[in-house]
Structure formats: C-alpha cells, structure tokens
Image: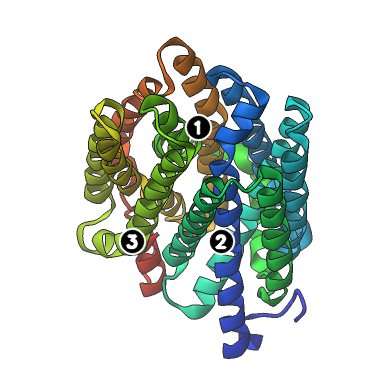
Amino acid sequence: MTLTAGPALTTDRSLRAATRAVYAAFIWSGFAMASWATRIPQIRDELRLGPSQLGLVLVAIAVGSIISLVLSGHIVARLGSRATVAAMAVLLAVGLTVVAAGYHLGVPPVVLGLFAFGFANGAWDVAMNVQGALVERRLGRAIMPRFHAGYSVGTVAGALLGTAMVALKVPVTAHLIAVAVLAGASTFVMVRTFLPDDAPASAEGGTAEKKGGLLEFWTEPRTLLVGVFVLAFAFTEGAGIDWIAVAVIDGYDTPAAVGTLAFTVFLTAMTAGRWFGPALLDRFGRVPVVRALAVIALAGLALFIFGPNTPTAYAGALLWGTGASLGFPVAMSAASDDPARAAGRVSVVASIGYCAFLGGPPLIGVLGDHMSVLRALIAIPVLLTVAFLLAGAIRPLPESPETPETSETSARV
C-alpha cells in the first residue's frame, strides 16, 4: 500500500487487517503501561524512595509524554501514523528495558528510561488515534470507543500478569524486559497493515498553520473549559494508576500482591465502563452520564480512602474505576465536534489533560509525606467536583455535522 492510497483503494480485507492492527496498538500500549505500574512498589523499595521522591521520579513519564504530545503533530505528519507507531514501539521497548535493568544502579537510569517510555507513549497514543479515526471513517460506523476499551483490556491483562509475577516473586528485571520485547516486537509487526493516512489531514494542518497554528485554539473558552474538565478526569485516572497499589500496601498494611490486585480491580472497572458506556451515552447524552459517573467515582474514593478494611478499599477501587472510565474519551469527542477544527482543539485539550500526569504524581507524593499516600488521595475529589460543575462544556455543539457517522461517533466516544 502506498501513502497516497485513498478510500476507493481500501479493500474489505485490508480494512479488517487495519482494524485488527489498531486494536493491537491500543492493547499493547495499555499492556506495557500497566506492566510498568505493577512494579512501582518494588522499584520504590529498591531505590528507597519516599512518597514525594517517588512522585518526582514518576514525573519523568509525564514530561516525556507532554514533550512528545507537543511534537506529535509534526512527527505524524512527517512519518505517517504507521511509521510513528512502529518507531515509538521500538523506543518504548528501549525505555522500559533501561528501567528494568537500570533501577539496580540508582535513580538516574530509571528517570532516563521513564522519560523515553513517556515520550514513546505520547506519540504512539496520538498516531494510533489518528489511524483509529481513519479506520472508523472507512467503516462508516463508530468503533473508536471499542479501540479505547482495547487499551483498557491491555491494562487489565498487564495488571493481572504483573500480579502473578509479584506473587511468584519473578524478578522485576526479567518481567519488564520480557514485556518490552513482547509489546515492542508485536506492535512493530502488526502496524504494517495500517491504512495509508488520508492526504487531507496534512492539508488541514497546513491551513491551521497559516491561520496561526494552535495558538488560536488556546483562546477558545469552550476548548479551555473542556481541557480543564479532562484534566480533572485525567488526574482521577492517573492517580489510580500510579498510587492505588502503594496506597493499599501502605495504608491497609497488606502484602504487595494484594495491593497489585486492587490496581487490577480498578483497571477492570475502567474497561467495563468504556466497553458498555457508549449505550448510556447514546441514550442519555454526555452531560448526565459524566456527571453520574463523577458521583460514582466520588463515592468510590470515599470508600477507598476512609473505608475500615481492605474489602471496602477493593469496593472503592471498583467504583473509582467505573466513575473515571468515560471522562477522557468523552472530552476528546467534545473537542472533535467540529471536524474542520478537531485537530487543533484535540491537541489543546490533550495538552491540558496531560498536565494532570505531570503535576499529579508529585502532588500526591508531597501530600503523602505529610499525612499518608492514602489520605493524600483526598485531592482527587476536589478536582472531580470541578469536573462535575464544568460538565456542561462537553455538550455537543449545535453546529456539529449531523451525519449518521459523525453524530454516532460523537455520542459514543
């Protein structure tokens, strides 16, 4: 397939292959991220890090991701979504290997590896979403929410495997290097069946650049409000990924495997929410659904933070994951309501959202030094309340195109 191939040249066979490849890209991305997260407590112990120190180390992923996010538009435009994901799969494998082999040597190799890991993850994320949107258009029906559910399936699989590795006392180095090789090589091979990118995408980018690039989108009130909304949900999701295992282990005095299993419960709940959530969005609309989910997440956090024992913490993790499941994808959909301006708005909203991954780990860590990691999670309900109040900003634009394809996609994502 050439990079100039258009819709007319897309066969059913190539479209099915591309659909499978996009699923694979989402799944392996989630698998790698969750696999790393399951080993955070052991790496923390080896490096003898306190909560605030661990938070600063975790910032390396967010810094790499944000830099990558800023550059990803240029990277994808130059390389295409296929080559970008392939290159980032290799970089991710290298970064995770550096973490796995270097944490015995001290903090600097871990920070370097996590920066590369985060950079790869950011560009990989953008590129696979570009390809997913292309596949969705060629199919003529909404499928993007299921791709995002595929990411969650990957996180659950990675968390379950990580739990087993912790319980079986498999060394961190062996576990993470195996994950790096498996995820990197599998993705590198699968993306060969990606569809060629549409030429109009770069033309649109050129038009936006002539009009002032992304700067004009940073002045739109609705776009900024959607960005703050997604920041709150990204913080809610990211804090769960980074801190649930540590909070259960330290706060409830449990073995490492028990804390890791709580992390798995959280990810499983997020997966179920993303898989079954589109039906609720179709029926009730964005605003009522995300507000209801924010309330569910708040209830889950109350149980998790203030519950009397480990079972209530597990119940809290279940509700927390369910409530956090649709905030990010629905916000991305809101930013995409106007297809002609979707790229710029999604970039702005995603950039604001990723600030949660930059500021979240050190904030929880600093608070954890003064109280405990478990009690430090009180910061999350504050932001979720803000998201509840700002949910009206994600209401579909009145001028949004009402074709069956775009309206269904907006409702489902």
Of helix, strand and loop, which one carries label 3? helix
Q: How crowded is mark 2: few (under 14 residues within 10 Å), some or many (20 or more)?
A: many
What residue is shown with label 3? 411
Q: Residue 19 is drawn in which quadrant?
A: bottom right
Q: Residue 356 carries which label?
A: 1
Is residue 231 visible in the rendered image? The answer is no
Q: What residue type is labelled 1?
A: Ala
What residue is shown with label 2? 26
**Residue furthest out toward the top:** 370
Spot occupied by residue 176 in the image (x, y as percentages of width and height):
67, 49
Q: Measure the C-alpha gap from mark 2 to mark 3.
A: 21 Å
Spot occupied by residue 49 in the image (x, y as percentages of width and height):
61, 21
Residue at (26% x, 43% y) in the render: 315
- Front-lying residue, 52 or 389: 52
Where does the N terminus fall, quadrant-wise?
bottom right
Between marks 2 and 1 in the image, the one whose residue lies nearer the viewer: 2
Q: Measure the C-alpha gap from mark 1 to mark 3.
A: 25 Å
Residue at (34% x, 52% y) in the render: 269
